[in-house]
Amino acid sequence: MLVLGDVHANDPENRRALAAAYAAADADAAVQVGDLLRYDLPIPTWFVAGNNEDFDVVEVLRRGETVEDAHNAHLLASTAVDLQGIRVAGLSGNFAPTKYDQPRDDLSGDRRRHFVREDVERAKQLDDVDVFLTHEAPHGLLYYGYDPGCEPVDEILATVDPELCLVGHHHRHAEATVGDTRVVSLAPAWERYYALDPDTLALSWSDTPGS
């Protein structure tokens, strides 16, 4: 299974790198951790929305409807899918303290990029999750002179207890164990792409061609 970090495919060079990663991986399915910005994809790809997306497309996908220009793009928004023998779930969006307690329907424009409490509570109800995707990091994974972790993500991992959590947003590879969960922050797709073994949940990576 192909695993991709942030893409930012509105940039032509990043779009070419995305195509190169798909071609090199030669996989049947993919998962991606947000900031995708391209939704017409060569193979079925399950992704969580980041803070940089076409939010009109994301909102239609969130409602479970189809988008003409979103071929093979499937949104995980506090939902789960059974994929190649494992259960993959995800939380879409990033955290804004001032918006967290608002109803999702009250968010408009670019503010639709955030997750809210109702999204987190719904994610915490998911069960039998093997791999959880999130754009925000939990505490204990990254450090920039401060820990950029997000408490709602901490809550989800403590409740859902996935074996593996894959994180976007930070554009760097890092690994940690948070509770009982192995957590991996992914390098961006223009640097490397990853492969996930569904039998063991082992994660390997290769340089993206042309990077």
Image (cartoon, rainbow, N blue to C red):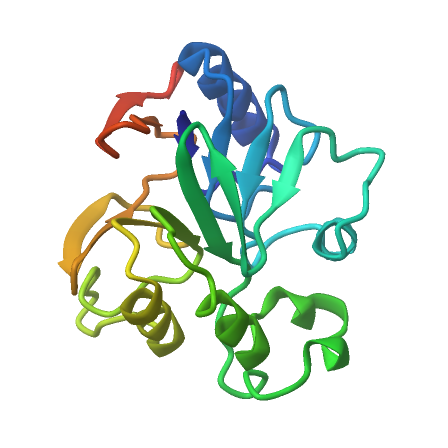
Q: Is residue 160 above or below residue 162?
A: below
Q: Percent position (x, y) of residue 142? A: 21, 61
Q: Percent position (x, y) of residue 92? A: 54, 59
Hey, which quadrant is residue 43 in on the image? top right
Lateral position of residue 132 relative to residue 109, left or right? left
x 31%, y 65%: residue = 157
Q: Is residue 38 above or below residue 28?
A: below
Residue 166: in sight, yes or no? yes
x 58%, y 57%: residue = 77
Looking at the rendered structure, the number of numbered marks drawn on it comes to 0
Foreground residue, 28 or 200?
200
Q: Is residue 29 above or below residue 90?
A: above
x 18%, y 49%: residue = 175
- Which image quadrant: the N terminus? top left
Q: Percent position (x, y) of residue 180? A: 16, 59
Residue 5: in sight, yes or no? no
Lateral position of residue 181 relative to residue 83, left or right? left
Foreground residue, 76 or 12?
76
- Which image quadrant: the C terminus? top left
Q: Percent position (x, y) of residue 36? A: 57, 42
Foreground residue, 100 or 198?
198
x 55%, y 19%: residue = 19
Lateral position of residue 105 relative to residue 99, left or right? right
Identity of the residue furthest to the right in this view: 68
